[in-house]
Amino acid sequence: MSAPRWLEMTWRDGLFCHWAVDPAVVAETLPARLSVATHGGDAYLGVVAFVMDDIRPRGSPVGLSFPELNLRTYVEGPSGPGVYFYNLDAADRFGVAVARRLFALPYYRAEMTARRDGDAVRFTSRRVHRDAPHARFDATYAPDGDPFVPDPDSRDAFFVENYRFYTSGRELYVGEIAHEPWTLREARVDLRANTLFEANGFERPDGEPTAHVADPIDVTADRIRRV
């Protein structure tokens, strides 16, 4: 398949936090035709914060930029492995409306900030979407190690090297993205608030997350299609 090119954007100031969970915890939340993807016998719930920069349809001279925060897991589906999103909170009313309509994704409007101070980023989010569960996030994160590209079969690659997402409504849909491999660094994170698990019906996982920050990356995305 050729690289998708309907939307173009840059993702920056990225944070990946992952918690290992029992696969059964995830399995009961998935729609039909999706199954849990595991690494080393564990399923994972990931909280990912970043800024979507200069999002534009191919050829458009004007783009949108706003922070985004999502809770996700990893699945096997009819088109191959991918990401399943429980929520995508974003700080742009128009962007949320377009994403909900064109991509059938669980986007919610939130008040967000992503402020950089040297190599550290403070990311805050408070959901304000009407008729949606309350969700709040407040963290400061910074790199704590040398840059690396994850080995293809590693757990770190399992977390980030995903080029497909699934979403469901009355039917199951899939979308494709394309980008170069991620460059990551281990991260130190001061996580002051995170209610995304509760907002999506999960108990808070035990233990500290595996945390990475990511270098900026250029991304292209295609329209979703029914599967």
Image: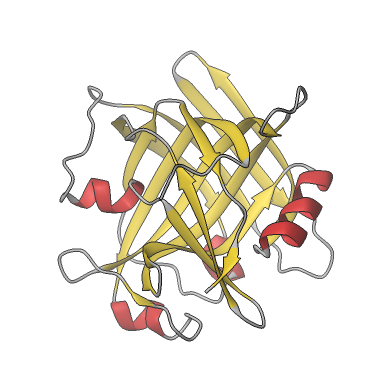
Residue 43, image x, y percentages = 29, 69
Q: Quadrant of residue 183?
A: top left
**Is residue 69 among the parts visible in the rendering?**
yes
Q: Residue at x 74, y 49 (%)?
A: 110
Tell me which colouring the rendered structure shows: secondary structure
Foreground residue among 135 and 48: 48
**Is residue 209 among the parts visible in the rendering?**
no
In this rendering, position of residue 187 left or right of residue 98: left
Foreground residue among 37 and 4: 4
Residue 27, image x, y percentages = 38, 82
In the depicted structure, whether residue 58 falls above or below residue 155: above
Q: Residue at x 66, y 33 (%)?
A: 58
Q: Quadrant of residue 131?
A: bottom right
Q: Residue at x 62, y 42 (%)?
A: 6
Q: Residue at x 59, y 32 (%)?
A: 9
Q: Quadrant of residue 56?
A: top right
Residue 46, image x, y percentages = 41, 56
Residue 140, image x, y percentages = 49, 33
The count of marks equals: 0
Foreground residue among 204 and 176: 176
In this rendering, position of residue 8 left or right of residue 188: right
Q: Residue furthest top?
A: 118
In this rendering, position of residue 180 left or right of residue 93: left
In the depicted structure, whether residue 57 falls above or below residue 170: above
